[in-house]
Image (cartoon, rainbow, N blue to C red):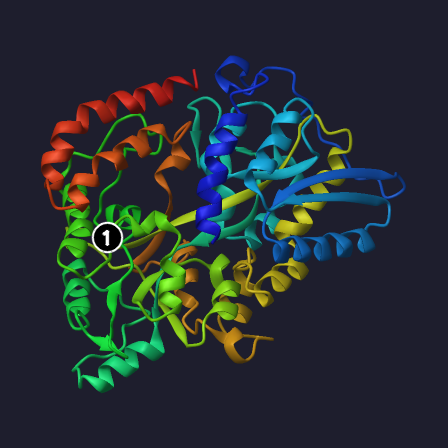
Amino acid sequence: MKKTLRATIGVAVAAILSLSCLTMTACGVGDNFGSQEYEAFDPDKQYQLDFLGWGSVAEQRNFQYMINQFMKENPNVKVFYNAISDTTTYSQNLINRANNLPDVFYVPDWDYIKWADSGRLVDFEKYLDEEEINQMWQKSIDIFRYDEATKTVGTGDKIYGLPKDLGPLALVYNKDLMVKLIDDYDLDVELPSATEPMTFTEFTAYLENFKGLKVDKETVIPLAYYDVQSAVYSNNANFYTDDSATTSAIDTDNFIDAIQFVADLSTKGLAAEYSEASSGSSFSKFASNTYLFTWMGPWDIATFWEGLSFEFDVIPAPKGDAEGARSCAPIGTVAYGVSAASQNKAAAVRLAKYLACSEDCAKYNYKLGQAMPNIKDMAKNDWINNVELAGVKQYPQSKQVFVSVVDDETDDDIYGKSRPYYYTYDKNAYNKLMDQFNTVWSGLKTAREVITGYASTYQSELTKTRNQLG
């Protein structure tokens, strides 16, 4: 699934960026990796573009279709599209081209700060007008902003990427299985609300209703795993005191309680062992009625359409019991980046804008179950109301949940935030912190014991990571 693919590629790209002066701290924004001067598109000029991406065979086929449509509308532009499903090969390709990047290529959010600080990406700010920006989700633009003075992502007047998609997370449940269990065991339980998030306490009690129940002699596990980042964010906590990610905030009561909540779900038998979060098997077990709940993003929809024989729906992430807590889901994304050294910059920007901003691509993507539209009006209207979707392609019915996560224009109890490693130079501090929690997941230690003992080390890791930006 895409979540696993993204995680794998993040490690590989991190290695790439340490080569050939892609060790960004040694290079810096001021180095000569290309011009930031505006280049106007000339309809009478012939352009050739090299576009590198990744994805499944189906996604590659879909992108080739969109690129073909772009070339029909822009007959003076020839795009050579290369996409690789094998991440090792993809990574090696980028290594080989470290100083001769493709005109257009993917930039994952977990490595965005490296690229933004490198001077190797075109600043889209001068290529976007107000109307284009306003039609997009604010988060989809802001997430690729960069403040060079403070070296902070998500702010500033530089925009070094355009969104391939936004990937908000939501809890998904097997609706058919849930209805069957309620009927077979005569449970006094209603289907979960898609608009009113449960609290941690309420969600725990809800899962208790299904603990130990069986279908065809097979025990159903209420939940595959709980997303740690959602738990932290949804309990009015964070990994850092602010988005500069310089100072740790893990030793707060809200953070500690969120981690303990995740662990308790497993030790109480309401969720599988936490290792399931990274095993890659949660979907297959969800498909075979082993798990009642798991997690999904809009990028998973086509996989769910094709791989499930039952109706499924989504609900917002539960909110913590702490004061001020709101339902929060992590948001992942990948950008279309344009090389600052491209000899065909105007055409490359035009292609990136077509893929990210055009109504045709937005509708094509959602009809294929590949992404939530980047165009907010289309998402709020056509997508959630299943325009041009029929049968199983109407699932999940509650797509409004995804919209609520990314929509900053509504003042509700649901929101979204980028994953913690988006704010840092690499994943080292985060990964080392997660390693410390293994004894918490198993019940051998409490979250407070582990975090109290590791807080100073985590701060040192954050400082190391931050210092790589110079």
Residue at image x 40%, y 52%? 280
Q: Which residue is mark 1?
A: 273
Residue at image x 77%, y 38%? 49
- Residue closest to the eye, 291 or 192: 291
Binning the other alpha carbons within 10 Å of mark 1 as few (below 14), some (14 to 19) or many (20 upward) gives some
Q: Is residue 219 above or below residue 84?
A: below
Q: Is residue 155 left or right of residue 359?
A: left
Q: Where in the figure is residue 71, as x and y percent of width and height?
A: 80, 51
Q: Where in the figure is residue 211, as x and y percent of width and height?
A: 17, 69
Residue at image x 42%, y 56%? 407
Q: Quadrant of residue 46?
A: top right
Q: Is residue 453 above or below residue 336?
A: above
Q: Where in the figure is residue 57, as x and y percent of width and height?
A: 63, 54
Element on which disc 1 rests: loop
Q: Where in the figure is residue 257, as x and y percent of width and height?
A: 14, 46
Q: Is residue 6 above or below residue 359?
A: above
Q: Quadrant of residue 84?
A: top right
Q: Amino acid at mark 1?
A: Glu
Q: Quadrant of residue 377?
A: bottom right
- Which quarter of the image is occupied by the C terminus? top left
Residue at image x 28%, y 79%? 216
